Image: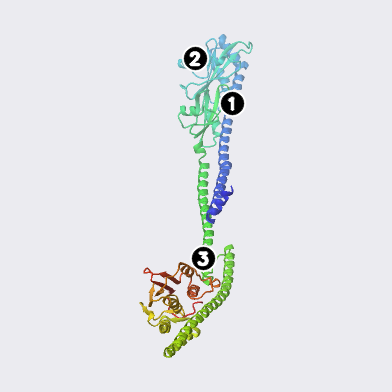
Amino acid sequence: MFSITAKFKEHSIKFRILVIVLPVVILSYIILLSSFYMIYVKESRNNILLEHEENTLSIAKNTASYFSSLNSNIDLLLYGTEIQSLIHSYADKKLSPEEVQSQCNTLFSTYLLGAQSKIQRVYIVLTDNGIISNQTIYNSTLEQQEQKLEQLSEYLKQPKGTLCYYYSPKEPYTITAAKNIFDIQKPEKKIGILLTEINIRFMEDMITEHQDSEYSYYSLFQNSDLVYTTSPYAPSVTASMNMNYHSHRGNSNFYAIRYSVNDFLQIGGLLNTTGAFHSINRVWRQLLVISIFFLLILVFAVIQISRTISQEFQVFITKLKQTSVADETALIHTVSSNEFSELTKEYNHMLLRLQESGKKITEQQILLKNAELKTLQAQINPHFLYNTLDCISSLASLGKTAQITDIVPKLADIMRMSIKGPDLLPISEDLNYVREYLDIQKMRFQDRLLFLIECNDPMEDLYIPKLIIQPVVENAIIHGISESVENGFLSIQLFTFKDDVLIKVYNTGPLFSHQVIEKIHSVSQTSFSDQKSIGLINIQMRLRSQFGNSYGLLLENMEDRTSVCVTIRIPQIHQREDLTK
């Protein structure tokens, strides 16, 4: 866990903001949409299904009420004294068939043939093969009634008072209700059967009252036979979809419900959910599109915010990387009015304080370095003076007064330059002092000293710190030529290389030891307090103190093993200035 947290903290602020905020935003939107779907969409769909079930149940109840009322009216008709008397009179032939039928029609009209009953025909089939009807009876009618009675024979065996129903596809608009007639004087004696042919259009009145939408279809079934339906689909398809109660069709485009009216009839309700849910689904799709649109806006906003915060920090990082000096160019300017503005102000105030502190420290370092350089020069001057006076002493002991007269003015020029002159001299002027020094040494060593000064590139406008070449030449004479029993040769070559000036001093004589080379090369601009020797170490410290550790002296033993070379490397200086500043 800690390693994951540590790895996470290694990433940028932009990445961490995106990783933390984006999942929260997306998860919140998913929860919001899921809640809306559960609360609005599913609840609305359930309400539509519930309303469809309630309407189907209401139609089933009304249908049951219709047939219950029909059953009651049939009982009133059959077990009234009028119809019983007419049946007995017809059986006993006390009345003619025409008189019986006329009186029965009156009773049929009173009890069964009302405007709301939708009953088309009424038949009374007597056990002695007589038949009474409200309409003219044809042979085909008799055959149909016999077929119906044959189909209803099993149902008519049920307990007394049961109203049975018969439907045949051959008569698609009619449903027949049948009931046994018993003698009221002898209740166990069956004297006939009442048949009523009902026009199934009576269902239209039932459905019209409860037609909730154009996508709800209602059907009347006798067991598995479809008697009547408002469905626009084929009867076989409608019957198939209504077979499964309280269920959806396989493709979930329909919802079917079925309620029993009685032991013979059922009411089925079929709902086209695709159409019924269309408006709800449209609202859901619109909301989904709008939500995705706003989610994309939020994601874009989070990315922009994280990018803005990252850019604010990047300003600091870039500025810090570009800043090498704590001056006004390093200040950060921002128009933000938030925490970054406060951070910028504090950073700028800190930078200004550092600038002031840096100026004070720089001034102190300049004073210290100037003091160090003056100390180094003060060490060189006595060293050179001691050697020159020693040379004059040698000439005096030999009685060479003319040469002494020539040496003293040159010595005076060199001492005047070293004590009073500026820190920087033109290279040509510095070479003149080197020639005067070599002239002094020439008087001492005579033919043992030969020297050559060559300047390969124009250097009229270039400057050099004073007392740099002369101490190196002096070291070459003292530790090289003076220790050689043969004649010595000294060469000074000057040339430019890129932005630097290279001065090579060659001399014959003993080679540099490895310890001396390492000692000179290891001197740095910060090792002043650790070194107390003068000569080459002094020059090395001066150059590196002024120009850095990439400049200074390079000591080499030449391949002929009879000479050495000291290379002085300094930057090109085109105007006289105090380099310590």
User: Mark 3 or mark 1: which is in front?
Assistant: 3
Number of numbered discs present?
3
Label 2: how many Cα within 10 Å (few below 14, some 14–19, many 20+): few
Residue at 50%, 19% (x, y): give it.
135
According to the image, label 3 marks what residue?
319
In the image: residue 482, left or right of residue 209: left
Label at residue 64: 1
Rendered location of residue 159, percent (x, y)? 60, 15
Residue 498 visible in image: no
Residue 245 visible in image: yes
Rendered location of residue 392, percent (x, y)? 46, 86
In the image: residue 434, left or right of residue 25: left
User: Mark 3 or mark 2: which is in front?
Assistant: 3
Label 3: how many Cα within 10 Å (few below 14, some 14–19, many 20+): some
Residue at 55%, 51% (x, y): give it.
8
On screen, residue 40 above or below 531: above
Cα separation, mark 1 vs mark 2, equals 27 Å
Rendered location of residue 417, percent (x, y)? 47, 85
Q: Nearer the viewer, residue 301 or 258?
A: 301
> Which callout, 3 or 2, points at the residue further toward the start of the chain?
2
* SS type, badge 2: helix
Q: Nearer the viewer, residue 338 or 484?
A: 484
> Which callout, 3 or 1, points at the residue further toward the start of the chain?
1
Amino acid carrying mark 2 in the image: Glu
Residue 128: quadrant of the picture: top right
> Which callout, 1 or 2, points at the residue further toward the start of the chain?
1
Residue at 59%, 67% (x, y): give it.
346
According to the image, label 2 marks what residue?
146
Q: Nearer the viewer, residue 413 or 359?
A: 413
User: Mark 1 or mark 2: which is in front?
Assistant: 1
